[in-house]
Image (cartoon, grey):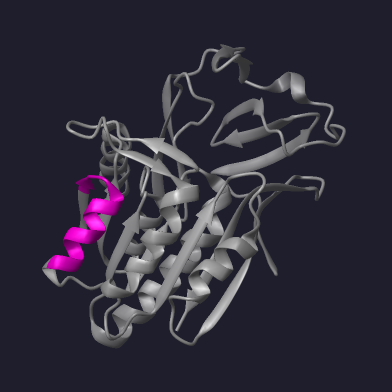
Amino acid sequence: MENFITTKSPGYELIDAGEGEKYERFGMVRIARPDKGALWKKNNAKWEDVSLVYEQKGQRGVWHKREDIPKEWTVIFDEITFALEIKQSKHLGVFPEQYTNWHFVHEETKKVVEKKKEAKILNLFGYTGGASLFAAKAGGTVSHVDASEYAISRARLNAKLSGLSGISYYLDDVKKFVEREIKRGKTYDGIILDPPVYGRGMGKGLSTTVWDIETDLAPLLERLPKLFSNNFSFLVISGYAFGYSHLSYRQLIENIVPKGKLVSGELLIQTDSGILLPAGITARWKK
């Protein structure tokens, strides 16, 4: 097991966490929002300095502004720009706990490009494009797939803000997309997956598209070797479900990848005082 830790940067900081909440800084905007993994006592006395507070009300929630801040702003991770937006969800459009995975994707894509002058990367459940952007930054040609029209639009915006090209966007059901790529004889040098526990398509013609990790993940992974190129170099999968172990992901991909280096562990974010907040799980394989 390895711990993959996101630490303080100019674009992001986990100031404190505890009592079911986390206190973060995105750029210059400080926010407090729920996090059921923060079971301990709060450590930082400056929670009153937050700019935005998210209050959960039943199945929905509401943001309370304590300062006059814009509805949208940007943050930068390693020269990659993300547009953030206040919506009904507690999510803003970027997941900082993925930073170590983004770095992994960047480094492995760069190795492929250096070896064969190109790298074809597939990003499934691509959301707002973090992994796609870091792969493109390394010189990769990326196929970015998501069943949410909103997510695709934000991914395009982030690429534009970052001055990056080389990404093709597909508003599609991931399972159907993979099957079509297999029929077309397409192959990839690296594959990224960030599947939700449950999801429903939110784009034109996708309203009946449903994803359930318990029934859909294993069959999807079993099909992926059909997309491996002769130079297939890396695969990374991550998730956020409490109740699942990183070993579940590790053992799932262990059966489909060639011999290489396979590691798994928790995605963690470190507070200013050194406390580690669990934020997800991941498994990574590289050639």
Where is residue 11 drawn, in percent x and y? Answer: 54, 44
Q: Is residue 255 above or below residue 215?
A: below
For the record, the magenta segment spans 170-183
Q: Quadrant of residue 231?
A: bottom left
Comparing 182 with 84, the one in front is 182
Magenta segment includes 40: no
Q: Is residue 165 in view? A: no
Q: Residue furthest left?
A: 184
Main secondary structure along the magenta-highlighted residues = helix
Q: Quadrant of residue 12?
A: top right
In the image, is 287 to the left or to the right of 240? Answer: left
Where is residue 203 drawn, in percent x and y? Answer: 23, 32
Magenta segment includes 171: yes
Comparing 8 with 34, the one in front is 34
User: Who's the residue at 76% across and 45% down the image?
Assistant: 272
Q: Quadrant of the C terminus?
A: bottom left
Q: Residue furthest front?
A: 215
